[in-house]
Image (cartoon, rainbow, N blue to C red):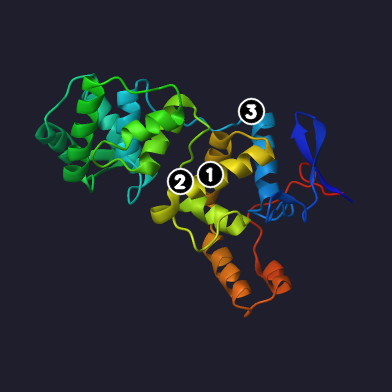
Amino acid sequence: MNTQRAYLTVGKSLIHVDIPHEQAEVVPGVKWGKIVAFPTVAYWLYTVLSKRLDNTTIQYKLGRSLQEEVGACLLGGHGIPAAVGLAAYEHLKALEAFNGDTYPEEQLFDWLSMPIHVNGKDIKYRFARQKACYLHHALKKLSEENPPIESGMALRNWLTDIKGIGLKTASWIARNWLDADDVAILDIHIYRAGLLGGFFTDDMTVEKDYLALEQKFIDVANAMEVRTSELDAVMWFEMQQSTSIKRLLEYREQLKNGSLDSQTVIRRIPQKRQTNSEQLALI
């Protein structure tokens, strides 16, 4: 059999989808894997298609202007829970920090030092001084220059000239604002998805090899015939929600060093979620 078949529920109907055989290669050296085996490439394709048909594609744009989008992405990211970053963004937006004016760094710091309401309680934003500095430089550049918006990569490269904005944050802004497919947001969740899916390797890291890893990600998305931005968003959402990633990474390491066999791994891996037998039935 050259394909795997799964079913997608659309209202009261079932639509079947045929995905290449688990041993077939999506790109050279990377197998599709089983549809039911989180997080294989086949699993990701099924999930993307399912969200399309359910009309539950992830909406990732955060701001109504590029200033707001830059602010939202700068205030989130590494070390900051998503809810806190979004609350800080809404807090500054309410104070009109992104209205086109260039506010002094101290003013932004004072605003970020105020208590911020998150999930029913007031919290202190952890990186107020640092992010006030980054925001000041970003909003200043946006007020003085016209950013290139002909492609995600052009905007991403322009943004990386701003203090405090690296490739990941710049890619995040460009993807969100332009709905761009020529960049990828390679945070820890996407990197782990790549390792477990077999299209990233241990000898490359986001810190050293961002652009090379990004190209691998784009190549996989293109071979799957899905949008890079769509795949990135679906992977991030599911990976950050999963409770089994640490265990899967441990099993992967044990498989590599020969201390565990694949059949033992299959028996040990918990179900990520209850499988709807009507929605996902292999033939």
The reply to whether discs 1 and 3 touch (Cβ–Cβ < 8 Å) is no
* Image quadrant where residue 29 sits: bottom right
Side (left or right) of 29 relative to 130: right
Question: Label 3 is placed on what type of residue?
Answer: Asn
Q: In x, y percent, where is residue 210?
A: 44, 49
Q: Is residue 53 above or below residue 1?
A: above
Packing grade of label 1 (10 A; few <14, some 14-19, many >=20) is some
Secondary structure beneath dot 3 equals loop
Q: Is residue 49 above or below residue 276?
A: above
Marks 1/3: CA distance? 28 Å
Query: Which circle marks residue 55 in the picture?
Result: 3
Question: Label 2 is placed on what type of residue?
Answer: Leu
* Image quadrant where residue 5 sits: top right
Q: Residue at x 11, y 30 (%)?
A: 104
Q: Residue at x 22, y 34 (%)?
A: 135
Side (left or right) of 192 relative to 159: right
Does residue 119 appear in the picture of this structure?
no
Packing grade of label 2 (10 A; few <14, some 14-19, many >=20) is some
Marks 1/2: CA distance? 6 Å
Query: Which circle marks residue 215 in the picture?
Result: 1
The reply to whether discs 1 and 2 touch (Cβ–Cβ < 8 Å) is yes
Give the camera-side residue of 243 and 257. Answer: 257
